[in-house]
């Protein structure tokens, strides 16, 4: 899959999205029906977008990279490494981020390709040696990130002011290895806007958001799978639902959540979306269904390594082993609920606990880890169990290497 956007070393940027191979991307929003729709030319990758300054920046915006190196050994957060249940629990090191802005999400493809995004347009990239500031010039809050290469990275944002939202609120930010631009995202009908993004590969990307809508990009256009119809209120009553649907659309089942907040999958035929206070939903490659188990209601954070190893949390935690969901009883610490989760091995996972605590589950026992910070931590990601990152408020970045 070649990058969607301007390839590296290409000439001056044109207001055009370039796709050299077939791709498939999904997007979920907070509407209650899923349907396949054909996008207008402006949202089809490969078709030119309006080139006016009111729609798309034509100039590449790339902030000069600022080296953000890790501190000296004396700044290590925890000094006592110990062997616990067969896993080395060592130091979490605090790494200078160069910003005081809150970091909302960390994600990566490998140990030398890690991203952290946050408030006021903050975007940082780790290349294996140092963190670099690669923030876009627009000060919108950045909430989620995914990509299939260092030249093809997508970011979900909040669009900022109402005026800005009208122009770009339903677009995605895109990084092509040299700079940022806005690219046409899914037409989030019904007033929904994207909140999260995940992809199985460069040709299978999903986006979720408000009104319970889910979209998938198939390499040609964004296709709505499920969610509310484009209009609500009078039009939704007067005009039959069937008139909104296109071929392949799935009717929204009852008890479909009104707001989807996260999306993750083990493959393009095994995708989950969480809904905060609502039901979690699942896609099996053919259709979406509501997971109506009371224990799964309200779950927000989700991560795993395969369809046989999935963790979901929001205060409590449940684990799926490929056959059944099991409620776990964390002891990490007993006073605080669990938040973000990252799993790097079957049955094992790191968890954010309370505001600034970190816990590890080795498949049998829980270990409380010293984070060394009082800042609120919001997100985790790792390249391996000995290479894990956590980010949070006031530009906090922590790194765990098992040493």
Image (spheres, grey):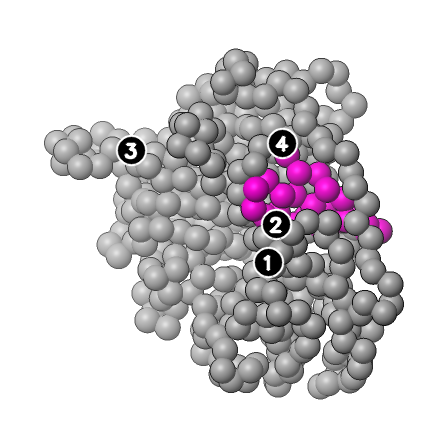
Disc 3 to disc 2, how far (Cα)? 36 Å
Q: Nearer the viewer, residue 110 or 377?
A: 377
Q: Is residue 131 magenta?
A: yes
The residue wearing badge 3 is 230
Tell me which residue sits at (22%, 37%) in the image: 232
Question: Which comes sooner in the sequence, label 1 or label 4?
Answer: 4
Q: Mark 1 — residue?
A: 393
Which secondary structure, mark 4? loop
Q: Position of residue 181 (x, y in %)?
A: 61, 28
Tell me the CA gap for discs 2 and 1: 7 Å
Q: CA distance from mark 3 to mark 1?
A: 37 Å
198 over 189 or under it: above or below: below
Query: What x and y, as percent, mark residue 172?
Result: 53, 34
Residue highlighted by disc 2: 101
Q: Which residues are magenta?
A: 114-136
Q: Residue at x 56, y 60 (%)?
A: 378
Q: Which residue is mark 4?
A: 137
The spot of residue 244 in percent (x, y) is 26, 31
Instruction: List the single residue furthest toward the left.
Output: 238
């Amino acid at each position: 899959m070649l990058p969607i956007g301007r390839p590296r070393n290409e000439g001056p940027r044109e207001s055009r999205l370039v796709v050299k191979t077939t791709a498939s991307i999904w997007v979920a929003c907070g509407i209650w029906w899923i349907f396949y729709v054909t996008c207008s030319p402006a949202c089809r990758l490969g078709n030119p977008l309006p080139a006016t300054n009111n729609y798309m920046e034509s100039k590449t915006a790339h902030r000069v990279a600022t080296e953000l190196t890790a501190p000296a050994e004396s700044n290590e957060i925890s000094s006592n490494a110990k062997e616990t249940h067969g896993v080395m629990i060592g130091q979490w090191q605090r790494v200078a981020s160069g910003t005081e802005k809150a970091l909302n999400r960390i994600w990566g493809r490998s140990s030398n390709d890690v991203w952290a995004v946050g408030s006021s347009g903050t975007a940082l990239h780790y290349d294996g040696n140092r963190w670099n500031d690669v923030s876009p010039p627009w000060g919108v809050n950045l909430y989620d990130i995914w990509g299939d290469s260092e030249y093809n990275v997508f970011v979900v944002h909040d669009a900022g002011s109402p005026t800005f939202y009208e122009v770009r609120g339903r677009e995605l930010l895109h990084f092509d290895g040299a700079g940022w631009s806005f690219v046409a995202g899914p037409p989030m009908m019904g007033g929904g806007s994207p909140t999260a993004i995940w992809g199985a590969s460069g040709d299978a990307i999903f986006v979720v958001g408000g009104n319970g809508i889910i979209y998938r990009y198939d390499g040609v256009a964004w296709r709505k799978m499920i969610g509310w119809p484009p209009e609500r209120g009078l039009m939704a009553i007067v005009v039959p639902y069937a008139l909104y649907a296109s071929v392949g659309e799935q009717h929204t089942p009852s008890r479909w959540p009104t707001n989807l907040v996260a999306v993750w999958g083990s493959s393009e035929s095994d995708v989950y979306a969480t809904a905060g206070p609502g039901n979690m939903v699942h896609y099996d490659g053919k259709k979406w269904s509501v997971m109506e188990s009371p224990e799964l209601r309200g779950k927000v954070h989700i991560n795993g390594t395969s369809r046989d190893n999935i963790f979901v949390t929001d205060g409590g935690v449940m684990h799926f082993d490929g056959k059944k969901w099991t409620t776990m009883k964390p002891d990490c610490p007993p006073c605080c609920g669990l938040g973000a989760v990252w799993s790097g091995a079957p049955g094992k996972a790191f968890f954010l606990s309370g505001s600034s605590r970190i816990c590890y589950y080795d498949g049998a026992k829980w270990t409380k880890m010293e984070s060394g910070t009082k800042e609120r931590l919001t997100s985790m990601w790792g390249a391996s169990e000995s290479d894990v990152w956590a980010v949070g408020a006031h530009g906090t970045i922590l790194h765990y290497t098992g040493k």
